[in-house]
Amino acid sequence: MQTLSTSWRVPDWPAPPNVHAVCTTRTGGVSQPPYDSLNLGDHVGDASADVARNRAALQSALGARPVFLQQVHGTLAVKLSAATPDGTQGDAAVTTVRGLACTIMVADCLPVLFTDTQGRAVAAAHAGWRGLAGTGAGAKPGARGVLESVFESFSALAPVKRSKFAIENIENETLVWLGPCIGPQAFEVGAEVRAAFVAHDPRAASLFQPHGDGKYLADLAGLARQRLHAMGITRIYGNDSTAPWCTVGNPSRFFSHRRDRVSGRFAACIWRG
């Protein structure tokens, strides 16, 4: 088994010892420019043999099998089993199976990892603005976003001792880590994006700064934190919307579709050992 690359980001959070998580960077693989070098996306034009080698190297480093979803900017959460194949459609994954890594690929969207204080279950979500707002693929008007969807599935797999306070306990025992994403200094969006979030929660308006000609700069990680807080989840770690977490502003470390247009994908993974 290989070891985790020193360039990868290991979450700094109080996860229990049986829960492991990592966020890769663009270094450590075999892909050629512009996918150099640890591109894990098989849908971006990279050589399939190189992607396969990169994915095999990731699995060896994790000591667990990463399950790669077909992400469509929706809200569907998939319950993973040993039989779940790569390419299963969904934008979030949950599991209790040891040695199976919930894996989210990103190149500007926000990866969100979940576990609980007892390490009973793990989950990962792909939170682009559409999935976060609940306006993505398959969504209906007023639908919940991907974070609400995955938390419902996660809660069912990580039940707490039943009491009249059970719901509160599930939320209080949940740990969340936000990975790198496009930062608020780079994420220019139109008025329709702001409207989608403000319609759900008027407080979201504070996370959009006017940027001229009907455009706004949006704080994607901040919007995720706001949605999580509204769900009663307060134990949130990782991305604080500062420059070191921005995929666009750190080209040597992160892939970015917004910056490069043709880009690889890095991944955030979480699994039970």
Image (cartoon, helix red, strand yellow):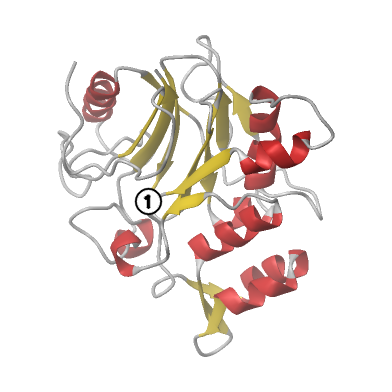
- Which residue occupies the foreground of this view, 119 or 26? 119
- Which residue occupies the foreground of this view, 19 or 150? 19
Write the residue at 34% across / 58% down: 261
Query: Looking at the image, can residue 75 be seen?
Result: no
The answer to whether 215 appears left or right of 193 in the picture is left
* Residue on which disc 1 sits: 107
x and y, in percent, of residue 35 in the image: 23, 45
Is the residue marked by circle 1 packed among few (<14), some (14-19), or many (20+) residues within 10 Å?
many
Query: Looking at the image, can residue 173 be seen?
Result: yes
Q: Furthest residue to the right?
A: 164
Q: Secondary structure at mark 1?
A: loop
- Which residue occupies the foreground of this view, 168 or 80? 168
Give the quadrant of the N terminus: top left
The answer to whether 241 appears left or right of 73 in the picture is left
Write the residue at 40% across / 33% down: 269
x and y, in percent, of residue 34 in the image: 20, 50
> Label 1 sits on what residue type?
Ala
Write the residue at 59% across / 86% down: 214
Would you place residue 21 above or below residue 255 in this image?
Answer: above
Q: Quadrant of residue 65?
A: top left
Q: Quadrant of residue 180?
A: bottom left
The answer to whether 245 appears left or right of 78 in the picture is left
Would you place residue 169 above or below residue 218 in this image?
Answer: above
Q: Quadrant of residue 258?
A: bottom left
x and y, in percent, of residue 197 in the image: 68, 66
Would you place residue 181 above or below residue 199 in this image?
Answer: above
Give the quadrant of the C terminus: top left
The answer to whether 173 appears left or right of 111 in the picture is right
x and y, in percent, of residue 81 in the image: 55, 13
Write the residue at 76% across / 68% down: 199
